[in-house]
Image (spheres, helix red, strand yellow):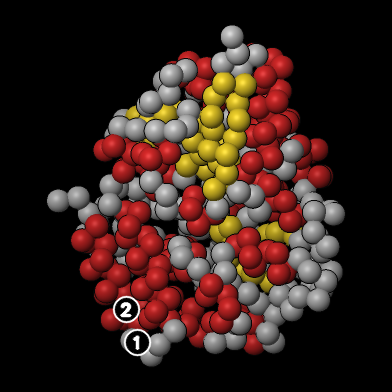
Amino acid sequence: MTITLRGMTWDHPRGYAPLAACAALWREREGVEITWDRRSLQDFESFPVDELARRYDLIVIDHPHVGQITREACLRPFDLNGVRDIAEGSIGESFASYHWQGQQWALPIDAAAQVMAWRPDRLPDAPRNWEQVFELARAGRVALPMRAPHSLMCLYTLCAQLGAPGNVTGPDLFEPEIATQVCDYLRTLMQWIDPACYEMDPIAVYEAMAQPDARIDCVPLIYGYVNYAYEGFRPVQLAFADIPHWQGNGPRGSALGGTGIAVSARSEHPDEAFAFARWVAGAAAQSGPFAAAGGQPGHATAWDDATVNAASNNFYRATRETLDRAWVRPRHDGYMPFQHAASERFVQGLRTDEAPAALIAELNRMFRQSLPA
């Protein structure tokens, strides 16, 4: 009798195509069937993992959920002894971001952070610093995805780049002086950017940017999507680079994203689920069928691979420093509601005349309330 596992991932070619391709190979190799359902990017960032664990054996998650899922006991932890090769091949903090309270709750299969996207058909090179970005913005050639939670991610990244990464253990998340400076800068920048960006996530910005008549030539902070670096994926092929330098600071502190594959605590076939998860997160699958099917691997072997880079216009080499120096968001139980509420509150403050210092103080108050008692 064929064992069938159900998996849930997110609805973008980067999210489902590599898993579908790997599942087909796994069926041929092991005789285990894996079907994959999808949910929207917005749903992926907010839908309760506990509810998904009631229906699926394998779940693709992002790391800020780990505090909540630890309390809910809805996932099975991985044996660290069996995944050391994956840990050693992690891009930046991708593997560590799924480690919480002594347990490994997921394996990174996709590595991402806020990087820079640009139009090589219009710009001779990627902007090197924020001064150059600002000049492009004043010419109406810059976009910035600001739909929740991406507005908050921009605040995170720029604070960390200036040497004040968020204090994930609290009590205050933001250093007031630096965060106020960043808030003021983003408000000024957004005056030159189409306000429609306040309702756009990265996918929406990429889809607009990759059209021949788009006015968007540069997006300085956006979660990297390798698919748009492929020739023929969309009418215009995009290029990627590390985030711009600011005040002499290089591409450090970008808010880490990416995804990990987890096993439901309610799966009736945990051994089979663990086996697939370990294989698809490993070097061979990541640099082979996973990358070839349009995935954005989480394993360094793939990021270093010449063939993988050639197919993606050097997406991986061009953004590697940003990924290796990325910052891990808070992950405590109670963080996820804060992330959404704070993102919307931040946008509200940016779109009004609210004093930046007062806005940052309010975000810090909200963060204190999110911390475990």
Amino acid marked by disc 1: Glu
Pointer 2 local density, CA inside 10 Å: few below 14, some 14–19, many at least 20: many
Vertical arrangement, residue 156 with respect to residue 110, above or below: below
Vertical arrangement, residue 319 with respect to residue 155, above or below: above
Pointer 1 local density, CA inside 10 Å: few below 14, some 14–19, many at least 20: few
Q: Is residue 188 left or right of residue 217?
A: left
CA distance separating discs 1 and 2: 7 Å
SS of the residue under disc 1? loop
Residue at the disc numbered 2 = 359
Residue at the disc numbered 1 = 354
Question: What residue occupies the far top of the structure in this picture?
Answer: 1
Amino acid marked by disc 2: Leu
x then y, percent, for residue 247: 52, 73
x then y, percent, for residue 229: 76, 54
SS of the residue under disc 2? helix
Nearest the viewer among 7 and 94 is 7
Is residue 119 shown to the viewer in this render?
Answer: yes
Q: In this view, does 363 lie to the left or right of 92?
A: left
- Residue at the image point whose x is 50% and y is 57% from the top: 42
Badges 1 and 2: C-beta atoms under 8 Å apart? Answer: yes
Vertical arrangement, residue 188 with respect to residue 55, above or below: below
Q: Give the quadrant of residue 23.
A: top right
